[in-house]
Image (spheres, helix red, strand yellow):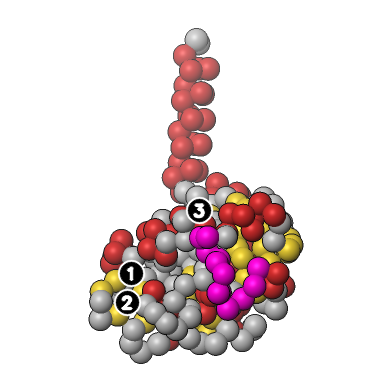
Amino acid sequence: MRRAPTLLVIALALGLSRQATANPLASMATAARHAPAYRSHIERLTAPTRKLMTGRSWHAGCPVPLRDLRLIKLTYWGFDRTAHTGKLVVHKRWAPKVARVFGKLYKARFPIRRMRLVDRYDAVDMRSMKADNTSAFSCRYRDNVCCTWSQHAFGRAIDVNPVENPYVGPWGVSPPNGKPFVHRKPLRRGMLALHDRGWWAFHTIGWEWGGSWKWPTDYQHYSATNR
């Protein structure tokens, strides 16, 4: 008679184990349903942010003055399937629209690895890309070669998940740790694709995708000018 409670406990444990095995994504789905609502906040660059950027992502002679830039603090969905707060600096003209785009990406649970200002990487583009950092403003030349400004220098371009969406050209793959993602099929988490939800979100504000370029092809890049 004493064995009955023990057998009952074992049976219940097996039942729970089978339920978990039958639906391994249940806990992930629950986490997504109970995630916090999307939030975004746009503000002028504060004194600490200006200090951080000056001499790194911004310097005298840049095509856009600091007063025309805005900091966006927003919620993004991480690869760990939880919500995080990230930061982007963009031109004031685009700040509200960019905030709406990332709201759509969050709603779609599109995963983003991290979202920090490039100044946290001393505004070295390759360091930011290798870290799989989604970023926007950076006062630099196109392909880091003098003397054509990148669209990032105007605050009207964003690079999303650079590792999963590398820049591919005659020089090779940037960043180098993006090589496993040069082949775009099968589509894996964090990768961008033509006519996916990310494409449509940016398309609604008139931004174009570098992944549509023939050669070189910049899978991480969205911009207002298609450059």
Q: Nearer the viewer, residue 35 or 76?
A: 76
Residue at 55% in and 46% down: 27
Which is more N-terminal, label 1 or label 2? Answer: 2
Give the residue number, with chain letter if any, for mark 1.
174
Q: Where is residue 161 in the image (x, y as percent from the top left)?
A: 45, 65
Image-based side of 21 in relation to 66, left or right: left
Q: Does the segment drawn in magenta span residue 152?
A: no
Amino acid type for the residue under numbered disc 3: Arg
What number is the disc on residue 168? 2
Specify the quadrant of the image occupied by residue 107: bottom right
* For residue 64, side relative to residue 179 (left or right): right
Tell me if residue 48 can be seen. yes
C-alpha span from label 2 to label 1: 6 Å
Name the outermost residue toward the top.
2
C-alpha gap between disc 3 and disc 1: 19 Å
From which residue to which does the magenta span run? 55-66
Q: Are marks 3 and 2 in contact (CB under 8 Å)?
A: no
Q: Quadrant of residue 102?
A: bottom right
Tag 3 residue: 120
